[in-house]
Image: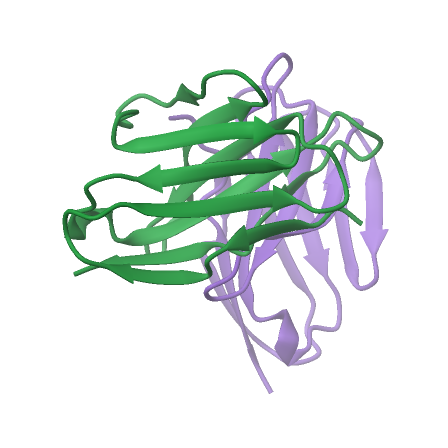
Chain colours: A purple, B green
Amino acid sequence: GQQLNQSPQSMFIQEGEDVSMNCTSSSIFNTWLWYKQDPGEGPVLLIALYKAGELTSNGRLTAQFGITRKDSFLNISASIPSDVGIYFCAGLQGGSEKLVFGKGTKLTVNP
Amino acid sequence: GAVVSQHPSWVICKSGTSVKIECRSLDFQATTMFWYRQFPKQSLMLMATSNEGSKATYEQGVEKDKFLINHASLTLSTLTVTSAHPEDSSFYICSASSRGSNYGYTFGSGTRLTVV
């Protein structure tokens, strides 16, 4: 099925560094969602974006809905060890209730 | 906030037996529930979509007679893996949505199924 292009696939950073990851698509999406998944757990919603150009923050996390509706990025500032996990972007297209997922970005934070 | 409870969190069963996984929305009515399967180091793969009181819609390649989905109420959906085989071993995750104020999709904590 359709999948979003998420990059990078993995990141290894030092504690305190900022992180950026993004998702792109050739199709337009009406909603972008960013999730974090810890090992053996289900994804947890971090940020939801509903409007083109929208910039939303949740603590140290900031995400934006691209103006073209074909991309979104997630930034994490001042990373800490508990930020470790897999981050997924997901999108909804008009008329569909099925989420389309990216392949995930695995984040490793070295203390 | 929206909470989805999934049970069991892990289960080990013998080949040929059936296993039922429950997904409950605790503090909201879920108009739609989704069932996913996730293989190690991969993204979530949608198996089926279910709406309360109607038959589930399965994705291409998913056997509906093997993965039985029941969505009896606005707060409960179940996935039954029938006649399980080792290749059915995987991480199964449910998600619930409600066309309410946040329109977010909330996931359960997942079920690790191991078929021996």
Instruction: Tell me the quarter of the picture where residue A48 sits.
Output: top right
Identified at 63% across, 70% down, the residue is A83
- Number of callouts in the render? 0
| Quarter of the image where the N terminus of chain A is located | top left
A54 w.r.t. A12: above or below: above
In the rendered view, would you say B67 is above or below B58? below
Whether residue A104 is visible: yes
Q: Quadrant of the C terminus of chain A?
A: bottom right
Residue A82, position in %: x, y? 64, 75
Against A84, residue B30 (above or below) is above
* Most distant residue in the top direction: A95
Residue A95 rendering spot, x and y as whole percentages: 62, 12
Q: In the drawing, does residue A47 fall left or right of residue B44?
A: right
For the residue pair B20 and A74, the one nearer the viewer reads as B20
- Position of B87 with respect to B12 (left or right) is left
Instruction: Name the residue at 16% across, 61% down.
Output: B116
Residue placed farthest to the bottom in the image?
A111
Q: Nearer the viewer, residue A80 or A99?
A: A99
A64 vs B17, left or right, is: right
**In the rendering, at what x and y percent does residue A75 appear?**
71, 56
Q: Is residue B43 visible?
A: no
Q: Residue at x 56, y 18 (%)?
A: B53
| Residue at horizontal 63 percent and vertical 23 percent from the top | A29
Residue B44 in percent (x, y) is at 43, 43
In front here: A68 or B8?
A: B8
